[in-house]
Image (cartoon, rainbow, N blue to C red):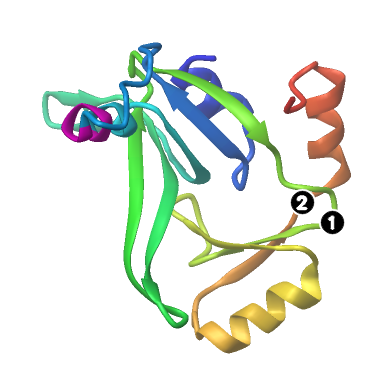
Amino acid sequence: MSASLIYDLVPIGSIVAWSDGTTRPPARFKKKLAVWQTRNSKGRLIRKEGPRQSGSYASPGYFTLHEADFGCKNTIVMRIHRTFGLDSDLTFKVLERPALGSVRVFDRAGSNAELVHLADNREAGEAWLKGHGCPNAILEDVGADEVAAAHVEGRAAA
């Protein structure tokens, strides 16, 4: 699947894998493996942004995936996000879509919103908000129409 199809069809909160099609190098080649892992991994879709125009420069749209968190004892020290332009040459695959009844927690309202948590239900989302203190956060339910559209059009995750 291309980057533009991910942008157009895949709902926020989905787990998406990306690949450049190369084979994984042996573990003994640590530097080669590290480079390979930057172009072959997976993450949760947390943001979509449309094309932008700034003077004579026009940038394509993009989407951002949350790959990992690093820290200890419930303290996140660093988050790894990967941003891909719609013109990316990588291949993408949807591994998992948000379940019906789950709730997306966005950091703010509007088109620039970023997913900060995907809760199992509304109560879990509200509890997460109380514990994490995002003052402008909003909750959005994953609806039946969104889940049904993925299955009817043959885009269900394998």
Q: Quadrant of residue 26?
A: top left
Residue 124 percent coordinates (x, y): 75, 75
Is 32 within the magenta?
yes
Q: Main secondary structure of the magenta part?
A: helix
Which residue range is magenta in the image?
30-34
Mark linked to residue 142: 2
The number of numbered discs placed on residues in the rendered structure image is: 2
- 21 in the magenta segment: no
Looking at the image, residue 37 sits to the left or right of residue 137; the answer is left
Sequence-earlier tag: 1 or 2 = 1
> Residue most toward the left?
56
Which quadrant holds the C terminus? top right
Query: SS at mark 1?
Result: loop
**Which quarter of the picture shows residue 38?**
top left
Residue 20 sits in quarter: top left
Task: Give coordinates of residue 75: x percent, y percent.
Answer: 40, 80
Instruction: Describe residue 86's horizontal placement relative to residue 55 as left or right.
Output: right
Amino acid type shown at disc 2: Val
What is the number of the mark on residue 101?
1
Q: Position of residue 132 (x, y in %)?
A: 52, 83
Left or right: 112, with 140 as reference point? left
User: What residue appears at the point 70 percent right and 73 percent down from the top-left corner?
Assistant: 125
Residue type at mark 1 is Gly
The answer to whether mark 1 and mark 2 are in CB contact below 8 A is: yes
Image: 20 above or below 145: above
Q: Nearer the viewer, residue 26 or 23?
A: 26
Task: Provide residue 34's location: percent of width, then percent of height.
Answer: 24, 35
> For the residue labelled by badge 2, is the local secondary structure a helix, a strand or a loop?
loop
10 Å neighbourhood of mark 2: few (<14), some, or many (≥20)?
Answer: many
* Image disc number at residue 137: none
Seen in the picture, residue 71 relative to 41 is either above or below; the reply is below
- Residue at the image position 33 percent from the left and 53 percent from the top: 80
